[in-house]
Image (tube, rainbow, N blue to C red):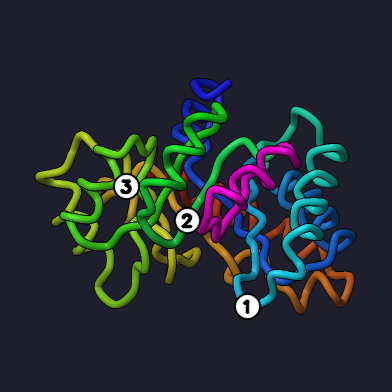
């Protein structure tokens, strides 16, 4: 299963980040994203509200049950082995973190899931890779981020990087051109106000825009 997930991430090149939505809204967002051509969704844990962790896991499970094999659902902002296990029990296929924590990476690999820790410096990225990361989330990608991604990817071309933070429809393709294998996109794609207003067709349209631009870069 891990190989299937890795290949799908490399093929699809975009993970939509679902943050701050209830279960029903998250499922609606997932459906709209799928209609727009995006098949990878990350549901994030809110570290300020540990009391919501179980509900986040149930949201992961709900999307997985609703979408079946059409989508691969992962967990985001995973900061402890305990959260890895909670996400795994809910059906998460990959584990994404904002930082590099060897204990999180180890538990992820023990459970047969794909590991995507966060890093910013070359030293952090190398440490994540050596700890067993399948991808490294280069985070946050702000400012002249594409140039930084290119600079990091050059000497560390054995590491699969995903660019996350500050990615939008106008610059997403530039990160692929710079050497990243994919991007993660949150509020610039999964707009909470659109979803809460019932305007999921806007999510679908935006997903199609991202898909079109990333497909163009592949050519």
Marks 2 & 3, CB-CB < 8 Å contact: no
Q: CA distance from mark 2 to mark 1?
A: 15 Å
Residue 202 image-quadrant placement: bottom right
Q: Position of residue 132 (x, y in %)?
A: 34, 35
- Between circles 2 and 1, the one closer to the viewer is 1
Q: Which residue is mark 2?
A: 97
Residue 84 in magenta stretch: yes
**Residue at point 61%, 59% (across, down):** 17
**Cα distance between the residues tagged 2 and 3:** 17 Å
Q: Nearer the viewer, residue 107 or 12?
A: 107
Q: Which mark is residue 48?
A: 1
Q: Nearer the viewer, residue 101 or 139?
A: 101
- Vertical placement of residue 217 versus 54, above or below: above
Left or right of 154 in this view: 117? right
Q: CA distance from mark 1 to mark 3?
A: 30 Å
Where is mark 3, residue-wise?
180
Q: Earlier in the sequence, mark 2 or mark 3?
A: 2
**Disc 2 crowd, CA 10 A, few/some/many (<14, 14-19, 20+):** many
Mark 3 neighbour class, 10 Å CA radius: few under 14, some 14 to 19, many 20 or more: many
Please identify the quadrant where the N terminus is shown.
Answer: top right
Which span is picked out in magenta? 74-91
189 relative to 13 in the view: left or right: right
Q: Element type at marker 1?
A: loop
Residue at 57 percent of width and 30 percent of height:
111
In the image, 188: left or right of 173? right
Return the disc, 1 or 3, that comes first in the chain's sequence: 1
Q: Secondary structure at mark 2?
A: loop
- Identity of the residue drawn at 20% across and 46% down: 126
Quadrant assignment, res 130: top left
């Amino acid at each position: 299963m891990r190989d299937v997930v890795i290949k799908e991430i490399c093929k699809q090149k975009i993970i939509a980040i679902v943050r701050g939505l209830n279960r029903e809204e998250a499922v609606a967002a997932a459906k709209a994203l799928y209609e727009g051509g995006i098949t990878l969704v990350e549901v994030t844990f809110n570290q300020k509200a540990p009391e919501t962790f179980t509900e986040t896991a149930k949201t992961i499970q709900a999307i997985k049950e609703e979408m079946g094999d059409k989508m691969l659902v992962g967990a985001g902002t995973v900061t402890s082995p305990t959260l890895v296990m909670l996400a795994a029990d809910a059906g998460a296929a990959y584990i994404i973190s904002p930082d590099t924590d060897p204990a999180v990476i180890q538990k992820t690999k023990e459970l047969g899931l794909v590991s995507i820790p966060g890093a910013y410096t070359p030293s952090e990225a190398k440490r994540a890779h050596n700890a067993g990361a399948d991808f490294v989330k280069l985070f946050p990608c702000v400012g002249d981020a594409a140039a930084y991604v290119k600079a990091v990817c050059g000497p560390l071309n054995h590491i699969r990087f995903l660019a996350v933070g500050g990615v939008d429809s106008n610059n997403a393709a530039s990160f692929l051109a710079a050497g990243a294998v994919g991007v993660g996109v949150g509020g610039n794609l999964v707009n909470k106000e659109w979803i809460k207003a019932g305007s999921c067709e806007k999510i679908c349209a935006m997903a199609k825009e991202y898909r079109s631009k990333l497909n163009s870069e592949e050519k």
